[in-house]
Image: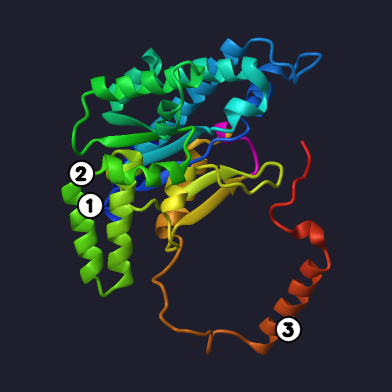
C-alpha cells in the first residue's frame, strides 16, 4: 500500500468513526515471536539467553504496531501488556524481570513515539499496585507510573494509548465512589433516575465507569485483536471488556504471534470492521433469502462439523 493509499484509507476510517476509532490490541506470543525472529538458528531455540534483548525487541514491535494503528486512522488504542497473575506465576526472578521491562513503556524510545505522534499515554489498573504495601516491589512500579501521570502534559483531543498494567476491574469499579467527583456521581444518579431507554442508561454508565477506571474518556471500544495461534481464545483485556454490554463490538484473532501483524493485516481487519457489512437489517427472520437446496446443504455441513469435535474453536492445538 502506498503512502497516498494509506492516507486515504485513514481518512475513510476517521469519517466512519467520528467519535474516534477505539481498539484493543491484546499482544500474545511475544516469547515465541522473539524465538522465531532471533533464535531459530540456535541449538536450543526455546532458551532465551538475553532478556534485555528480548525486552528491547518486544518494545520495538509494540511501538511499531502503535504507529500502524494511528497511521491507519485509529484514535484510541488499548494494550494489556501485563496481568496481575504474571507477578505470581513464574517466581520472584521473573517478577523482577517484568517489573523492569514494564518501565520500558516510559523509556526514551516510547516517549519519542508519544511526542512524535501526538499521543497521551495512560497506565490503568495501577490502583492494584498502589494498594499493596510499599515494601512489596510491585508497589514501586505503580508509584513510578503514577508519578509519570503527574508529570506528563496531557492535552484534550490528542490520541491515546491506554496500557493496562495488572488490572483488577472489580477493584477499580469498587473504588469509583472514591475517585469520581461528587457532582459526577450526582449527575449519573439523576440520569439513571430519569432514563426511559436502556441505551441511554448504558451510555451514562459506560462514560462514568470508564472515566473512573481508565482515568480518561473514550468511546465504547469497536474491536479487539488477539491471537489464537494454539487455538486459545482468551480475552486478555480486562477493564474495557468488563465495561461492555454487548453491541457491535467485534473480535478478531490471528493464528500467529501478534508481533508479526503487518500494515496489510491490520488494514484488512479495520476494513472488515468498518466496511465489511451492509446496513443492519431489521427483519426478524430470513424470509425470502434462503432456498431449500441451501437449507439441505447447510444442514449436512453442520452435521459434519458436529461429528468432528476437532472443529471446535478454542481447543488448544499444542505449541
Residue 258 located within the stretch drawn in magenta: yes
Q: CA distance from mark 3 to mark 2?
A: 60 Å
Residue 83 seen in render: yes
Question: Which of pointers 3 and 2 indicates the residue nearer the eye?
Answer: 2
Q: Earlier in the sequence, mark 3 or mark 2?
A: 2
Residue 230 located within the stretch drawn in magenta: no
For the residues labelled 2 and 1, say whether their Cβ atoms are less than 8 Å apart. yes
User: Mark 3 = which residue?
Assistant: 296
Q: Residue at x 48, y 56 (%)?
A: 250
Q: Residue at x 25, y 23 (%)?
A: 150
User: Mark 1 = which residue?
Assistant: 185
Left or right, 262 with reference to 186: right
Of 262 and 8, which appears nearest the observer?
Answer: 262
Tell me where residue 147 appears, x and y as whole percent: 31, 20
The image shows a total of numbered marks equal to 3
Quarter containing the C terminus: top right
- Label 1 neighbour load within 10 Å: few <14, some 14-19, many 20+: some
Tell me where residue 222 appears, x and y as whole percent: 40, 53
For the residues labelled 1 and 3, say whether their Cβ atoms are less than 8 Å apart. no
Q: CA distance from mark 2 to mark 1?
A: 7 Å
The image shows residue 205, relative to residue 262, as above or below, that is below
User: Mark 2 = which residue?
Assistant: 181
Which range is magenta? 255-259
Q: Residue at x 32, y 45 (%)?
A: 176
Amino acid at each position: 500500500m502506498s503512502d497516498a493509499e494509506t492516507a486515504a484509507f485513514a481518512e475513510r476510517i476517521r469519517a466512519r468513526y467520528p467519535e474516534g476509532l477505539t481498539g484493543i490490541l491484546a499482544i500474545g506470543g511475544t516469547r515465541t515471536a522473539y524465538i522465531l525472529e532471533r533464535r531459530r538458528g540456535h541449538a536450543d531455540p526455546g532458551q532465551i539467553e538475553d532478556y534485555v534483548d528480548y525486552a528491547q525487541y518486544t518494545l520495538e514491535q509494540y511501538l511499531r504496531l502503535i504507529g500502524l494503528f494511528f497511521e491507519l486512522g485509529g484514535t484510541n488504542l488499548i494494550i494489556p501488556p501485563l496481568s496481575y497473575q504474571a507477578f505470581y506465576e513464574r517466581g520472584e526472578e521473573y517478577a523482577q524481570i517484568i517489573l523492569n521491562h514494564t518501565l520500558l513503556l516510559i523509556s526514551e524510545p516510547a516517549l519519542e513515539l508519544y511526542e512524535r505522534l501526538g499521543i497521551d499515554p495512560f497506565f490503568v489498573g495501577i490502583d492494584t499496585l498502589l494498594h499493596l504495601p510499599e515494601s512489596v516491589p510491585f508497589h514501586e512500579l505503580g508509584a513510578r507510573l503514577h508519578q509519570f501521570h503527574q508529570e506528563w502534559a496531557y492535552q484534550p483531543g490528542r490520541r491515546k494509548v491506554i496500557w493496562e498494567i495488572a488490572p483488577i476491574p472489580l477493584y477499580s469499579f469498587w473504588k469509583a465512589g472514591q475517585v469520581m467527583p461528587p457532582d459526577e456521581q450526582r449527575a449519573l444518579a439523576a440520569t439513571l433516575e430519569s432514563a426511559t431507554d436502556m441505551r441511554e442508561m448504558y451510555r451514562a454508565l459506560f462514560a462514568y465507569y470508564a472515566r473512573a477506571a481508565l482515568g480518561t474518556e473514550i468511546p465504547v471500544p469497536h474491536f479487539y485483536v488477539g491471537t489464537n495461534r494454539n487455538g486459545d481464545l482468551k480475552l486478555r483485556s480486562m477493564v474495557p471488556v468488563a465495561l461492555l454490554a454487548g453491541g457491535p463490538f467485534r473480535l478478531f484473532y490471528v493464528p500467529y504471534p501478534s508481533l508479526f501483524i503487518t500494515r496489510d493485516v491490520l488494514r484488512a481487519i479495520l476494513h472488515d470492521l468498518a466496511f465489511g457489512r451492509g446496513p443492519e437489517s431489521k427483519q426478524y427472520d430470513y424470509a425470502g433469502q434462503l432456498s431449500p437446496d441451501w437449507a439441505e446443504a447447510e444442514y449436512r455441513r453442520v452435521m459434519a462439523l458436529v461429528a468432528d469435535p476437532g472443529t471446535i474453536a478454542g481447543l488448544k492445538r499444542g505449541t
